[in-house]
Image: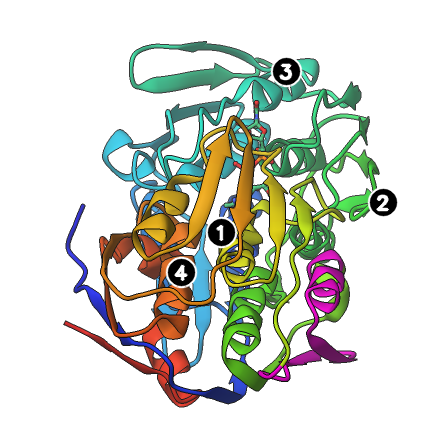
């Protein structure tokens, strides 16, 4: 897929103002999958207008689920009363890795699922062994052929204690959803703690599930025999929010992002303070500004599972490090192939050397505009940010990656004063 218009950025314009955070991409896609667990009409609000939501809607529709997206109202209505298929087809799943989230719900409710092997951003190997081990512990049997995972649970799933070898976000979510309709108790240890997992658990609980501990590494799910539809307001997107705050850091700000809890990205905000930025927080907003006569300061960053520094903000922070005084070291510990933006930043004048999962970034005084390539969702956003700070014009190609996860990225940046358009 390479259909979206390029993004053209003229660098150097001041960025300031207020933007509203959209609902979290990484939450809403799982909320959509979770609606499979209960027959009837579900309502999800604060839904971002992004292509991944449309793709996930297509996955659900291919199973006979009715999905209506009121874009103006940012609301989804999902009617799961007449499911006609237990297959998530390859042509859709290949485009969106998060569609693996339908596996747990289908399996626990219908005792059978056929889910194509997922695609998504090419930022690493992205294996599924933790998902499989977790669901097998509850009684899943499965085999894979070239395209599909064929899973069954004759007689239904049964709760069990499960220790995840790594706190995988997707595996924690799949297991938590599968456990809701399993017989007995499931205990998930070394669970992922991302805010989107607590958001999913809140939705599941309002559907009648009995989950405690979501948001900690110890989650307990008491299985229940049936669930009912529910309404849910999606949590704000901490990664989108962090991206706009980096724009403020590069060009001075102040920029305020509303509709986001600072607790969701506290580690990133702490790093911003270490870089020399002013960070103001309220319960549901964050403001970042910088005195442009003072340089950004070099810092070390290592991506880790929540509450550590999020891998989804690594590329954006690399842009700041590129313009900071001194040498920063960035360690990418979550994905093995997530420095593809470094080469483009070097083409813009940055001084970055990558060695395995480390990137060594020596700050330069300026970047210059050129044509760069959006290799994945967050890399694409980072290159737009680099363009905002660079001298001259930057053209970002392959922007369909950006549209997967950022609602109105160009118009929100325009509203902050950026000179940015689509070509
Ligand atoms: C989710 C987010 C993604 C974010 C990531 C880490 C969504 C839609 N995507 O992805 O934006 O960057 O969390 O915060 O929510 N792994 C295995 N085996 C498995 C599962 C994962 O080895 O069975 C590895 C992956 O290859 C990766 C690491 O664990 O290297 C993290 O993966 P995981 O936490 O599962 O991320 P996702 O749920 O795919």
Q: Nearer the viewer, mark 4 or mark 3?
A: 4
Give the spatial CA distance, label 4 vs label 3.
34 Å
Q: Earlier in the sequence, mark 3 or mark 2?
A: 3
Give the spatial CA distance, label 4 vs label 1.
8 Å
Q: Earlier in the sequence, mark 1 or mark 2?
A: 2
In terms of depth relative to the viewer, which is nearer, 184 or 259?
A: 259
Give the spatial CA distance, label 4 vs label 2.
33 Å
* Residue drawn 23% across the image and 35% down it: 91
* Residue drawn 79% across the image and 30% down it: 190
Count the marks. 4
Q: Earlier in the sequence, mark 4 or mark 3?
A: 3
Q: Is ligand 1 less than 8 Å from the beta carbon at label 3? A: yes
Q: Nearer the viewer, mark 4 or mark 2?
A: 4
* Residue linked to disc 3: 133
* Residue linked to disc 4: 381
Q: Do the residues under discs 4 and 1 have CB atoms within 8 angstroms?
A: yes
Residue 390 is situated, as x and y percent measured from the top left of the image, at: 36, 70
Q: How is the image coloured?
A: rainbow
Q: Callout 2 environment at 10 Å: few (<14), some (14 to 19), or many (20+)?
A: some
Q: Is residue 275 magenta?
A: yes
């Amino acid at each position: 897929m390479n259909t979206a218009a390029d993004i053209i950025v003229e660098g150097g314009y001041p960025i300031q103002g207020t933007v509203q955070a959209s609902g979290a991409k990484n939450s809403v896609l799982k909320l959509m999958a979770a609606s499979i667990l209960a027959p009837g009409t579900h309502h999800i609000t604060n839904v971002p207008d992004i292509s991944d939501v449309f793709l996930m809607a297509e996955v659900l529709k291919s199973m006979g689920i009715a999905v209506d997206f009121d874009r103006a109202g940012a609301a989804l209505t999902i009617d799961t009363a007449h499911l006609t298929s237990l297959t998530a087809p390859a042509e859709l799943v290949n485009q969106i890795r998060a569609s693996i989230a339908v596996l747990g719900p289908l399996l626990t409710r219908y005792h059978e699922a056929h889910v194509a092997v997922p695609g998504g951003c090419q930022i690493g190997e992205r294996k599924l062994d933790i998902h499989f081990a977790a669901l097998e512990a509850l009684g899943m049997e499965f085999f894979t052929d070239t395209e599909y995972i064929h899973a069954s649970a004759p007689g239904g799933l049964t709760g069990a204690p499960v220790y995840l070898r790594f706190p995988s976000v997707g595996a924690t979510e799949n297991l938590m959803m599968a456990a809701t309709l399993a017989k007995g108790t499931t205990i998930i240890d070394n669970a992922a703690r991302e805010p989107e997992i607590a958001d999913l658990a809140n939705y599941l609980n309002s559907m009648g599930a009995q989950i405690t501990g979501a948001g900690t590494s110890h989650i307990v799910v008491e299985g229940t025999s049936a669930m009912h539809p529910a309404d849910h307001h999606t949590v704000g997107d901490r990664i989108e929010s962090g991206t706009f705050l980096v724009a403020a850091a590069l060009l001075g700000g102040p920029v305020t992002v509303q509709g986001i809890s600072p607790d969701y990205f506290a580690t990133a905000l702490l790093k911003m303070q270490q870089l020399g930025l002013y960070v103001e927080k309220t319960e549901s907003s964050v403001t970042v500004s910088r005195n442009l006569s003072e340089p950004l300061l070099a810092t070390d960053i290592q991506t880790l599972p929540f509450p550590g520094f999020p891998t989804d903000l690594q590329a954006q922070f690399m842009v700041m490090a590129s313009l900071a005084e001194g040498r920063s070291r960035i360690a990418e510990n979550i994905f093995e192939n997530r420095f593809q933006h470094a080469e483009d930043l070097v083409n813009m004048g940055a001084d970055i050397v990558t060695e395995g999962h480390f990137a060594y970034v020596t700050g330069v005084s300026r970047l210059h505009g050129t044509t760069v390539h959006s290799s994945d969702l967050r890399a694409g956003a980072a290159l737009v940010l680099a363009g905002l700070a660079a001298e001259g014009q930057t053209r970002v190609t392959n922007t369909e990656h950006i549209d997967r996860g950022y609602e109105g990225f160009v118009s929100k940046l325009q509203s902050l004063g950026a000179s940015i358009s689509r070509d």
